[in-house]
Image: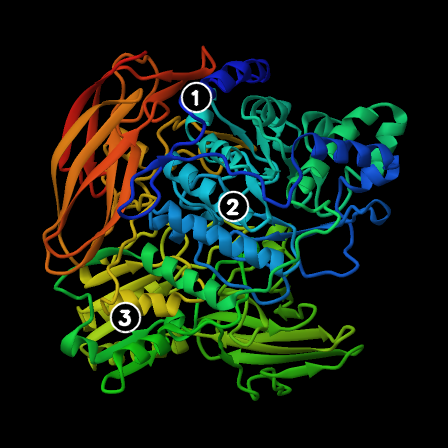
Amino acid sequence: MSEAVSRRSAIRLLAAAGAALGAAGCAPTVPTGAGRAATPAAAAPPPAAGGAGADAAHRVESLLGRLTPAEKTALLHGARDPAPLGQSGYVPGVPRLGIPPLRFADGPAGVRVAKPATALPAPVLLASAFDPSLARAYGRVLGREGRALGVDVLLAPTANLIRTPYAGRNAEAFAEDPRLTADLVAEVVRGIQDEGLVAAVGHFALYHQEQGRDTIDAVVSEQTLHETELRGFEAAVAAGAGAVTAAYHKVNGVYAAEDRALLDGLLRGAWGFDGWVLCDRDAARSTVAAIGAGLDMELPGGTRFGRPLGEAVRGGSVSQTTVDLAVHRILAAMDRFGLLADRPAPRPARDAPAGARTAREIAVAGAVLLRNERATLPLAGAAARSIAVIGPTGLAPFVSGGGSAHVVPDAAAAPLAAIRRRAGSAAAVRSAVGEDLYGRPLPPTLLTPPADLDDRAVDAGRDWSHEGVFTLPADDEWTLLVHYTGERPGVRLDGEELFPVRPGAAEQFAGGLLGTAPDGLAVRRRTLPLKAGRHRLAVTARGGPRGQRLRLRHTTRATRAADLAEAVAAAKAVRSVVLFAYEDATEGADRTSLALPGGQNALIEAVAAANPRTTVVLNTSSATTMPWLARTGAVLQTYYPGQEGAAATADVLFGDADPGGRLTQTFPADERATPFAGNPLRYPGVGGRQEYSEGVHVGHRWYDAQRVAPLFPFGHGLSYTSWAYEKLLVRPEHGGLRVEFTVRNTGRRKGTEVAQVYLGPSPELKLDQPVRALAGYRRLALAAGAAQRISVHLDPRALSSWDPEQHAWVLGTGSREVWAGRSSRELPLRAKAVVRSG
């Protein structure tokens, strides 16, 4: 493994880094949409309502001088909101000085408060469109809705890479690739802040898993850190991000929220960040070290920056100057966004129809067609008039993942309804659940004494309990589910509590699909083998201050077999099957397998055997193994598609839109063939230590370096038409390279293509370099038979590597290979060009 960056060298490298950024450009070149030339990304201007120059500085200094020590400390930590919105944080203002409070909300895929909001597609689906202009539009929906719903700071976007497919929050990230992540993060930041909302970019840095997320020590080399994870954060700063959220864990032995090298040295020193740094979910581990390192604010409470900070100032371990600096950063950012104005800009009204239109456009643009055999898609002719929709997420909408990304929309249709509407009244569309996610009622006579446990009301202030026995005639596997509205009921089977409170975020976040029943009741489930014979079941519930409803349900081998038989019968009776499969990832827990959960693999195998014209629609967060792939007709990846996912999926299934999405993460052929297989030090870590020993070979770069064949490569995605690439020309331009080639639609219908450019290593740099790195891309739409000449500029940053000895970006000179094509593994065009310094 490469040497981890030392604390001393991490600080020393920063001055050189700043100079390098000025020379090479902080933000990568960003293609701005189909058919338009790529232009370098510029830092976003401050919102028009904010102050500027000497007037702003004087205003902030005047406020700072009039604040009392207690008022200053109160601005640095969260508190209880007297008028809560259901948001994630609140910092009280100082009314006597006209400083308003700040309200913070989670928002990677929509504004998460107690009111309905536009549930956008997951960021990973947005990223699959490879379109920064759509990312800008996505950000603008977040920004307008955040302002309309009373929020001041949105905890979004996520700039962390998708490093491991097991990570529970991969749907909130964009890509495994640093370049693509940087482009999209920057545009989402600009979009949010175009509307006057502060974007707080998270989580700085190396937050890639839920296992040990509060304590793991991420050990990484200087080169790896700069060339991979930091690219998205650097681009966010260049885009003018108002705030940055520190990660929970350690980076090279120091907690991220008290890492001076990262916060003061790199973020503020080298990159010139002028916003404030906050931490979420109690990530502050200290008072003196954290504020001294550059952490400005603690959320959601004041464990470290409340009373302990005041005591530290009075005791002399923290200077008043340090506190003043943190307060100044917060006030300066608030002033920039117009929050300190005598007459702040009025909050806009929600524009729910506009949000819905953007959500649908993105869900269509990002849908990735992974497989399409025997002309299974698009559905047309007789195949479109006889359809079975199978799977629980076909019969009910799967809008978003769990945790911070879970959003409750105004409305969301089920795919079954959208498919019926699109197929028309002349079509026969039947359905089958395939797998029961929420259980069947326990027979009232199961227990002795009997009890109806399917809809039990418990009045406010009352307690209720029931205990009984039942007898199983044979061994079985049961899933027991409790649905409830208040405090979680206790359910004990043979003396064991089935649903104990889990530690940390795993208890708070239970998933976006499995954690909530269709009628809104919270759900917990437990699967366990039961022996034949007598069992004792006890249920207790408290009504609490408002009363509650509860129900206890179950599935068994017999009910699962019946669901499977029903699905197979439906598949045999129709021309086409659309089978929706799910994987409910969430904050607080990593995936334990890349396989689909439950009995879905068996369901797909059985249905595809009954009807080879089976399309599998995947509502999953990340890469999935597919042992059933060869038996299917088509596979469409739509991730977590948001509130308009049903209509968008129907658009693609019936060919109203070409599937224009491309994978932003590699799908492995086998769980034994990933960068982490057999290497627990990489993931999930050993003894609290995690090593980034893959170096710069993150994602698709690792598969290329190790010559491992994936199931589907980075950048992969099929179209309903066919494409040809011709006439590659590469020549020097503006210190970089100009790459030109022709893309031709050789099919019979209009289609959408994502042309990708990859760059090989420099022979003159004695540094670890990828076999191929994504260097540019263009999304374009072409009519049948049409062709377009594409031009992609590779700027000096794209041609550079981070030298840990010089602590700077260095240009990779010499003969460089350039490829162009449809994915990281489908690159028909190849050329060489010489890169020269000066």
Query: Residue 157 has which mark?
Result: 2
> Which mark, residue 441?
none
The quarter of the rendered structure image containing the N terminus is top left
- The quadrant holding residue 289 is top right
> How far across and down, in percent of the image, does residue 66 sit?
86, 36
Q: Is residue 111 visible?
A: no
| Position of 461 relative to 157 (above/below) | below
- Mark 1 Cα-neighbour bin, 10 Å: few <14, some 14–19, many ≥20: many
Q: Position of residue 439 (x, y in %)?
A: 49, 75
Three-letter code, disc 2: Pro
Residue pointed to by mark 3:
578
Q: Residue at x 61, y 28 (%)?
A: 263
**Any mark on residue 223, and which?**
1
Determine whether 225 is above or below 598 in the image.
Answer: above
- Element marked by disc 1: helix
| Mark 2 to mark 1 CA distance (whole Å) | 24 Å
Separation of residues labelled 3 and 1 (CA atoms): 46 Å
Q: Is residue 149 visible?
A: yes
Which SS class for mark 3? Answer: strand
